[in-house]
């Protein structure tokens, strides 16, 4: 079972995800190589970040195979970032549009897929700002930008909840409840994990 813990910067997702178990925690990865420049072709930028996300998803599958479940600190299928950036006015839709056929190929090849459960937290701006100021271990230089992305992030996961009913929750439940659910989950694979038709339905809602 793969669980995604999602929210903007300072929402508390890393603290929550790690508390579910260090051994099963899948954090964000360091970038490999040099990311394409902002003015490079959209397809090149989309391909680079999809490959980055595929590495995280592969790690989630490894953790799941070893422990029975994995807890992803942010969705490995992170194309929502490009979409949210465009919706918030920080970028154009070029990268998101270029990513679509590449995503279909990645799902068909089982290199990217959907999680079994998404826990998404929406946080009040003043609470997020207070938590940012209280955390001296991280600079969060683009905090205001991430705050502006939040309504669009929620819209993305609302669309996901429509194509994956019952798999998206807009809260961080009690950790004991989550652990009970993942540990009691039957080991068979979610039949919709690599379903390209589900991906198509999601992308259609976000067009």
Image (tube, rainbow, N blue to C red):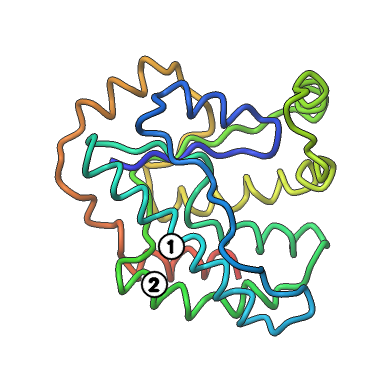
Residue under the point 74% across and 49% down: 149
Picture quadrant where residue 199 is located: bottom left
Q: Which mark is residue 25?
A: none
Q: Position of residue 193 (x, y in %)?
A: 30, 56
Mark 1 highlights which residue?
54
Residue under the point 50% across and 41% down: 27
* Disc 2 residue crowd, few under 14, some 14–19, many 20+, Cα 10 Å: some
* Left or right of 32 on screen, residue 165: left
Which corner quadrant holds the C terminus? bottom right
Mark count? 2
Q: Position of residue 144 (x, y in %)?
A: 85, 42
Query: Which element carries disc 1, helix, strand or loop?
Result: helix
* Left or right of 194 on screen, residue 126: right
Mark 2 highlights which residue?
106
* Left or right of 136 on screen, residue 122: left
The residue at the far front in this view is: 33
In this view, 91 is above or below 97 = above
Q: Position of residue 59 (x, y in %)?
A: 37, 50
* Disc 1 residue crowd, few under 14, some 14–19, many 20+, Cα 10 Å: many
> Between tags 1 and 2, which lies in front?
1
Picture quadrant where residue 94 is located: bottom right
Residue under the point 47% across and 53% down: 76
Q: Position of residue 10 (x, y in %)?
A: 70, 31
Which corner quadrant holds the N terminus? top left
* Left or right of 142 on screen, residue 116: left
**Depth check: 116 or 143 in front?**
143
Q: Are marks 1 and 2 in contact (CB under 8 Å)?
A: yes
Query: Which element carries disc 2, helix, strand or loop?
Result: helix
**Depth check: 46 or 157 in front?**
46
In this view, 138 is above or below 135 = below
């Amino acid at each position: 079972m793969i669980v995604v813990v999602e929210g903007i910067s300072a929402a508390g997702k890393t603290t929550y995800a790690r508390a579910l178990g260090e051994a099963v925690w899948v954090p964000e990865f360091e970038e490999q190589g040099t990311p394409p420049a902002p003015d490079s072709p959209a397809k090149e930028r989309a391909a680079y970040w999809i490959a980055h996300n595929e590495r995280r998803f592969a790690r989630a599958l490894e953790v799941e195979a070893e422990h029975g479940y994995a807890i992803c600190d942010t969705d490995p299928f992170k194309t929502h970032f490009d979409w949210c950036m465009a919706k918030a006015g920080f970028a154009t839709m070029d990268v998101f549009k270029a990513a679509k056929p590449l995503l279909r190929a990645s799902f068909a090849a089982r290199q990217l897929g959907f999680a079994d459960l998404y826990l998404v937290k929406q946080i009040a701006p003043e609470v997020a700002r207070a938590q940012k100021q209280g955390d001296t271990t991280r600079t969060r230089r683009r905090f205001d930008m991430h705050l502006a992305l939040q309504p669009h992030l929620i819209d993305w996961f609302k669309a996901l909840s429509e194509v994956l009913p019952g798999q998206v929750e807009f809260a961080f439940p009690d950790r004991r409840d989550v652990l009970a659910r993942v540990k009691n989950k039957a080991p068979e694979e979610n039949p919709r994990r690599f379903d390209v038709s589900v991906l198509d339905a999601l992308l259609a809602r976000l067009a």
